[in-house]
Image (tube, rainbow, N blue to C red):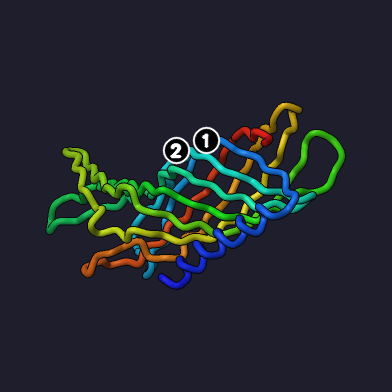
Amino acid sequence: MKDVKIKFILASIFVFVFLLDLNAQIKIRVKGGLNFGTATLNPEPVGLDIEHRIATVVGIGIEYSLENIAVQFEILYSMKGTIIEYERILGSYSPIKEKITSKVDYLEIPLSLKYYIPIEGSIIPFIFTGASISFLISSKEITETEESTKETDMKDYTNNTDFGIIVGAGTNINLGSGIIVIDARYNFGVTDINNWSLRIFETKLQTIQLCIGYYFNL
């Protein structure tokens, strides 16, 4: 996986150095929106209810476009994670309901290839795919029961980097002076985020991201 991350960084550098030599249109983007985060656990657990953690994503990006094809590079503060609910049974006592909220926040760097569907008018739809590498900022677990709430710092037990594959779609709304962009994407995490020898599950993050942003033409 280390080799994959190195190739991702080298590919990013190559693409943008190459595009700088072309007559490309360059746009700067600011964006914000929501992450709907969850996780896949392997082996698949029994008796756990896995729900989405809804959190914030904000960032900036730059796009190089040639006619209907564009390459987009972004830097995002992306709050991911999941919520797990289950019942813990202690001997002959009544089951205790526990809720664990995993808060895993990253500096995320996606690189994607975008295709604009050629239609007339000021509203232009697009599709895109690519990959992202994420660098861990913080990792915490909030454990809640009916009687108490406990916060645990999990940064030492979480891998410093995560790698994902992204697919998405959206639309540009051309205002003349700038462009409003709305998009949705799915980020398939492909690496185990756990860095703990006693871990029970392999954990991979999955995130649906809904954003609105604004492009400034350069």
Cα distance between the residues tagged 2 and 1: 8 Å
Residue shown at the point (34%, 56%) measured from the top left: 48
Where's the C terminus, which quadrant? top right
| 212 sits left or right of 133 in the view | right
Q: Position of residue 102 (x, y in %)?
A: 32, 49
In this figure, which residue is indicated by the disc labeled 2?
A: 56
Secondary structure at badge 1 equals strand
Q: Position of residue 8 (x, y in %)?
A: 51, 64
Looking at the image, which residue is at 56% across and 53% down?
Answer: 186
Density class for disc 1 (Cα within 10 Å; few <14, some 14-19, many ≥20) is: many
> In the picture provided, is 116 more to the left or to the right than 194?
right
Residue that lies at the very extreme toward the right in this rendered image:
120
Q: Amino acid at mark 2?
A: Thr
Count residues near mark 2 (Cα–Cα under 10 Å), then give few for <14, some for 14-19, many for 20+. Answer: some
Of marks 2 and 1, which one's residue comes earlier in the chain? Answer: 1
For the residues carrying marks 2 and 1, which lies nearer the camera in this image?
Answer: 1
Q: Quadrant of residue 88?
A: bottom left
Image coordinates of residue 200 in percent, x first then y, are 27, 67
Residue on which the image places disc 1: 32
Whether residue 115 is situated above or below residue 14 in the rendered picture: above
Residue 137, percent from left and from top: 33, 48
Taking depth in this image into account, of 7 and 51 the one nearest to the observer is 7
Q: Are marks 2 and 1 in contact (CB under 8 Å)?
A: yes
Is residue 98 rendered to the left or right of residue 164?
A: left
Q: Residue at x 63, y 42 (%)?
A: 183
Number of on-image labels: 2
Which is more toward the observer, 135 or 183? 135
Residue at image location 74% in from the left, 44% down from the top: 125
From the viewer's perspective, tell me whether residue 43 is left or right of residue 199. Answer: right
Name the secondary structure under disc 2. strand
Amino acid type, callout 1: Gly
